Amino acid sequence: MSGRMSRVQRQLCSLRGTLMNSGYQQDIVILGGGAAGWIAAALLAKKTDRQKTRITLVESEEIGIIGVGEATIPILAQCNAMLGIDEFDFVRSTQGTFKLGIEFCDWGVAGNRHFHAFSDYGHPVEGISTHHYWLRMRQSGEVRPIDDYSFAYAVAKNNNFAPSDAPNSRYHHAYHFDAGLYARYLRGVAIELGVQRIEGKMTHFDLDGESGNITAIHLANDLKVPGDFFVDCSGFASVLLGKGLETPFVDWSRWLLCNSAIAVPAKRAGAPTPFTRSTAHAGGWRWTIPLQHRSGNGMVYNSDLWSDDAARDTLVNSIEGEPLAEPRLFRFTSGHRKQFWNRNCVGIGFSSNFLEPLESTGIQLIVMGVFKLLKYFPERTINPVLRDEYNRTSTCEIERIRDFIIAHYYLSRRPEPLWAACRDMEIPDSLRHKLEVWKASGQIALGDCESYMEPSWLAILLGNDVVPARYNISADLYPLEQIRNGMELRREEIVRSAQAVPSHQDFIDQHCKAPRTAPAD
């Protein structure tokens, strides 16, 4: 064999030399692509000095991502704006649609329907939240649901959509998109911002004998990738944070009983709704996510109380369009790593935490994790004070989100075994306190690091008919007829304004219609 090196070998040697002699003050290495890896890469590249920090992302095409229809909350719009992404180009490129909230069907009791909207129920009146006036009206016999005073709901229920005008936005919006196309889109954004991508599958890593820090990862193609700080975006495998640094996992399955999901794409039936739909079933709940080229469908359930076959049959029989692939089964455990940031490695996405997708928290937790990392961004010598604060706030945030999700199950009055078990379980003290304060006073007792504010809690509590014993005494300062007139004026104005909003499909067709293409997943 000739002694001359092949072109691939020369490229590897050149890349190896570049990595070992970079001249940068800090090398950040991200392991894993997908949404977590490329969001982290793009945001870090956008918000750090390219002359001081080099960002390298290592991913393998051999390792697939969980490519399902993805639903988000409005924080992603903030993330996209920070990256300078054109909203219409983003939606068009990811076969996306818009989202104004989540519709809950058959939660609480069969036949119940309520909406968690990305909006409030009106501005406070002299410091008193609008729902206290609604509670007073209800005590007097008023029967209108709280949803009637949500602008986002009025738009969504008619399958309409248009962005609410800033700075006086009446509602916010988020997106649905194809997860595979989204990762590909963000890859282009990140590389344009200077991120270096390396194709390869990690085989092992090096630890410093004194500090225990990760010093490099090794790939199957014999490439060694050294770094000062590592971002683990390897998903459930948690290759660096979990396995490598042996960071314990905090198991929340005693509170979040569902442990399995089945997902299947289907042909879209009808116009796409500007909301995600969550429908409760005997053994769990089903999601429906509308995209431009198809719909995303899935069932979340507890495999000990509902068989995989029963869940699969219920899912397949309930979707409206023709299935486009065989259903895929996923197992999971809700919870988080005890440390989100351990030594010189931080976990972003599923490598550090997982909560079932009931409130579309996956992308939310990724973006929040990177935002916090930018806030406490490490230097070559990591300050343990900043690392501890990152871990404290990350733990606090996810515990508050956990409580919000538990509440959906705990408040149910459905009779089936899963729902009865959720209703009878011992809930976290933080959630119990919030519910007790609500039932006694009609107040939402918000704590530190809350992601879901008062309107979100109101949507779930009042949507499940959990009505408090009283309302704020200041709501009695106005005559009841004056309150009725004021609330009715708001409702009528909402209805009138919502009717002027174009249909969701028409808005997409005019601004961000995607070309016909095969789905990425």
Image (cartoon, grey):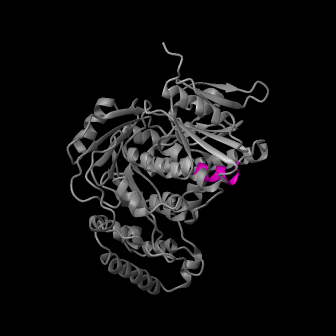
Residue 188, above or below 81 = above
Residue 463 location (% of width, % of height): 41, 60
The prevailing secondary structure element of the residues shown in magenta is helix
Question: Where on the picture, by quarter, is residue 495?
Answer: bottom left
The structure residue drawn at horizontal position 24% and vertical position 59%, both measured from the top left corner, is: 271
The structure residue drawn at horizontal position 52% and vertical position 48%, both measured from the top left corner, is: 191
Q: Is residue 226 visible?
A: no
Horizontal side of residue 68 vs 54, given as left or right: left
Residue farthest top in this picture = 1
Residue 67 location (% of width, % of height): 38, 41
Horizontal side of residue 210 vs 4, given as left or right: right
The structure residue drawn at horizontal position 53% and vertical position 35%, both measured from the top left corner, is: 234
Residue 10 location (% of width, % of height): 54, 28
Question: Where on the picture, by quarter, is residue 264?
Answer: top left
Residue 367, above or below 311 = below
Q: Which portion, as a residue range, is magenta?
A: 368-377
Q: Is residue 371 magenta?
A: yes
Residue 108 location (% of width, % of height): 39, 52
The one nearer the camera, 78 or 517, is: 517
Q: Is residue 402 magenta?
A: no
